Structure formats: C-alpha cells, structure tokens
Amino acid sequence: MTFTRSVLLTLITGAVVSGCYSADQSIQPDVDTSLASTELGKPNLVIIYADDLGYGDISSYGGTGVNTPNIDALAAKGLKLTDSHASAATCTPSRYSLLTGEHGFRSDAAILPGDAPLLISPRQATLPKLLKRAGYASAVIGKWHLGLGYGDVDWNQAVKPGPLEIGFDYSFLLPATGDRVPTVFLENHHVVDLQTTDPLSVNYQENIGTLPTGISHPQLLKMKADPQHSNTIVNGVSRIGSMTGGESAYWIDEDFPDIFTAKAVDFIREHKEQPFFLFHSMHDIHVPRLPHKRFQGKSGMGPRGDAIVQLDWMTGQIVKELEKQGIAENTIVIFTSDNGPVLDDGYDDNAVEMLGNHKPSGPFRGGKYSAYEAGTRVPTIVYWPEHIQPKESDALTTQIDIYASMAELLRLDLVEDEAIDSIPQLDTWLGRSESGREFLVEESLGTISLRHGEWKYIRPALDNTLPDWSKNKDIELGVQNSEQLYKLTDDIAEQNNLANSHSDRVNNMKQKLEQIIESGYR
C-alpha cells in the first residue's frame, strides 16, 4: 500500500490516551520457577543510560577534551560497539523503546512535558516485567521522562501509575528532566521530603504562585536561559513550567551524583543474593549542567565537560560496588546514551565557547534531534568479565534489541505483540557474532530514516512544521523536502546525497520503511 501521513497517524494514535487505562489492569505474568538455566545462568543486568552523550564525548571513542578513565576501562575490557544506536534522536522515544521493545512512533512517543500522563500502559509488556518472570528484582534510578499518572497529577498524594505499575520494584526519580518542574525527587509513589503544610502545585499552561522566574528576576540566575527555559527559578536556575509550594522538597542539582549513586549502591547491596536489573538512568550530561564542586573545572571545557567527568565517576562507583560485592562476574553492564549530543540546549553555560578541538559527534553529521547519524549513533559498551572478550565490533545494533536478547539469554518466550520491534541479537551483544541488524529504523525530529547495512535512507519530512524551539539549536536536523540516500562506508559524514543516482535503491528502502512502520520487522 502507499504510505501517507494519515496512515502513520493511525498507527501511532490510541495506544496511550490520558485516562484510557488503569493500574489494576496491569498484566503481571507469574514467575516461571521451572526455567532451566542456560550456560550463562541468570546474570544481573545494569544499564547505565547517559543523557545527550555524543559518540565522540568519551576518550575511548575519540574524545579529546575530557578524560573518562572508568568508562574507558569498560571499553578496554569489554565489547566496544561502533555502529550502535538509540532508537531515536530524542530521549522519551528512546527510553520508551528500550523498556518496551517497540518503536516510539507506535505510541506517539515524543519529548514529553513535565505533567504528561504515563506513556507506557500498565497493561503493556516491559523489560522489567519480562525479567520478573525469571525472578529478577528491578529498579529505575535517575531521570524518568516517560510521564506519570493520568495527566493531572496531585503531587501531594501517591503519584501513580508510574514505574512500579510497569514492572519495576523500586524507583527514585527526577519525574521529568532537570530543566523541567517539578524540581523534586519522587521515590516510588511519593515526593521526597514534602510537607503537608506546604502543598506542591505544577502548571505548564500559566505561571502560578510567587516564585521568581527567569523573566522577572534574571539577576538571580546562575546562567542565562532562553525563553523556553525561563519560568520558575529553583537553585538559581530557571526551568520549563511553573511551580509553587513544596519548597522543603526542592532538589539541589549539584547533589545529583551523590544522591543517585547512593541509591544505586543501596539497591545493589540489598539484592546481591538474587538476580537484579538496575536501570541507572543518568541525568548527565543533560541541561542544566551543574556538576558537583568536586568536578567543577576538571575538564577544561566548562560545565558540559565537567558533567562528563562526573558521569564517568558515577559509572566507576557502580562498577566498583559490583566488584566489592563479588558479583561483577555475574553482571552484564551496558553503558550507552539515549541520543546524540547537543551543546547549546537552552542555557548559556559556555558549551560552545569552551569546546576547543573536542568533537562531541565524532566523525558523524548532526546531533541530538537530527536524522543524520550523530542523532542516534552513540557510544555503547557491553562489559561482562569472563564472558565477553575485549574487542571492537562494527555490527549494526540498537538498544531496542536488549529486550529480546535478554529473553533469548533467559530462554523466555515472548507472547504475541510483545516487544514487536525487538530482535534477539544475544550473540552480537556478547561479541560472539558480527552479523548485527539487517534493517534499523531511526526516529528523529520531523522525519524518520532507515539503515540497511552501509546504506542510509532519510524520508522527506511529512510537512514543513518543526517546533519553534528547534530553530534555536545549532544542529543540522536533516529535515528536507526531498529524499536522501547515503553510503556510509564511503561517506561517513553523509555529505554526498546519492538519491538521484540510485533511484531503485531509494524506492526499495522507502517501501521497506513503510512496511516496517505498518507491520514491523518480522
């Protein structure tokens, strides 16, 4: 059939509508106690998910402006993937895909406001639910940004549905992002340290309360922000959205590394005797970049570089704890990022001015939001002592396949319509095979792309409308009115559009992309 915009809208509409599901409808499969152990047993799974970290932002991937010894040690001792991708060039759909095994466009996943309803239905199959069938405990710690509740959250009551309703046993979250209100921690269902005498209110439509904003009180700011980020000021930083009350619960951004690391370490210690899944969803190096004073000035690239140093330290603390508890050899650690890099993303923190010769996107074109390779091609390292031999692989891989690959490892069958875009690639993720993906869809702002081996097809934009804020990003988004085709082995920077001279390949890849969108890869 001919693909049209209306078909895509039909595909992505209806999976999540505010109020259309309830937590008591959650599918909770019984634990299968009869599972036979594979040769690899039931290893713990730790996913360290950096935010906005580019392919070239760490030294083991060519970064020159900052040293990342802890991450580099994982790369030196494990599997370093050089053609590995987030499913999208923005965070919400990437996170959605990792946890559900399906592309974000199937549920209209996009960058969510801070008061959005939970994007993943409690009825939906998820990675933590899958692992629970094999007896795993699970936790998500850090940035969430997948929505909470039904879209009209009362932050002074139990906030749900949320991570616990989609399979996690424990959660300690930034409810949305560091640059959005509410600037509070959410532990399981409740805001941490909130006092009933000072209720918290959040509004994304209008300013509420009397807290200063970046517009009204710019003299209070630690760093200047663009209009989008110039609402309520907390800790000297203006945010997206308005908030009032709940002041006893407000976070201090510089404390993130210690607080999140402590929570992750506690979870590891408490569950070291059973298999566990830790989704350590980092805030770094997302804006606002406010590293702890221990890391300030350590990179020579300003707050963005210092945040990378901080991220490296946090990664090292997790690995050290696994070693301390004697469970490193029974733990798969995957280090990766939710999308490519961005320098100026709303705050004046000198990320551009202090960049020097450092190349966040490495040899690739674009960055966060972009259809070009740097939008989704991210550093990805798989570390499992005594099971993965140190090597580098250029196999085409994607985070969306972690789901089916863990099912393959644990010999768990996926039911119909579960993780429909996830393909078992266990041997590739363990460095035993170089085959990788044949086809891979990449989502980005304003368009969608298809990888087929060395070839990359970028579909024309559905329309010419991009959000106003995207015009402030100094990134090539790759959104054009005509088709694009690149042969990456000859043109890694995607400079030579071959669409006109390879019309048959363009048509074939266009048809394949439409088929995947409509029916999936299988």
Image (cartoon, rainbow, N blue to C red):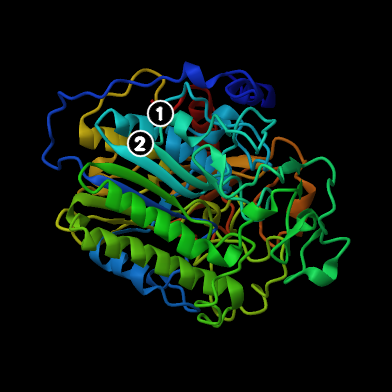
Q: Amino acid at mark 1?
A: Ala
Front-lying residue, 138 or 428: 138
Numbered label attached to residue 157: none
Q: Nearer the viewer, residue 131 or 378?
A: 131
Circle 2 is placed at which residue position?
Answer: 403
The residue carrying mark 1 is 419
Q: Residues within 10 Å of mark 2 (few under 14, many from 20)?
A: many
Which of 277 and 500 lies nearest the eye of the viewer?
277
Which three-letter amino acid code belongs to the residue tagged 2?
Answer: Tyr
Report whether 198 appears left or right of 441: right
Residue 501 in view: no
Query: Residue drawn 36% across and 47% down?
Result: 278
Quarter of the image for the N terminus: give it. Answer: top right
Residue 510 located left or right of residue 394: right
Q: Nearer the viewer, residue 138 or 13?
A: 138
Q: Quadrant of the C terminus?
A: top left
Image marks 2 and 1: residues in contact by CB distance under 8 Å = yes
Left/right of residue 303 with respect to residue 39 in the rendered view = right
Query: Residue shown at 53%/76% (left/top)?
Result: 358
In percent of width and height, residue 189 lies at 53, 37
Against 440, is 209 above or below? Answer: below
Dot 1 surroundings within 10 Å: few (below 14), some, or many (20 or more)?
A: many
Q: Position of residue 244 (x, y in %)?
A: 77, 48
**Would residue 337 be found to the left or right of residue 474 on screen?**
left
**Is 107 rendered above or below residue 428?**
above
Residue 155: percent from left, percent from top = 65, 38
Judged from the image, the secondary structure of the residue bearing numbered disc 2 is: helix
> What residue is drawn where x is 75% and y is 44%?
466
Q: CA distance from mark 2 to mark 1?
A: 7 Å
Total number of numbered labels? 2
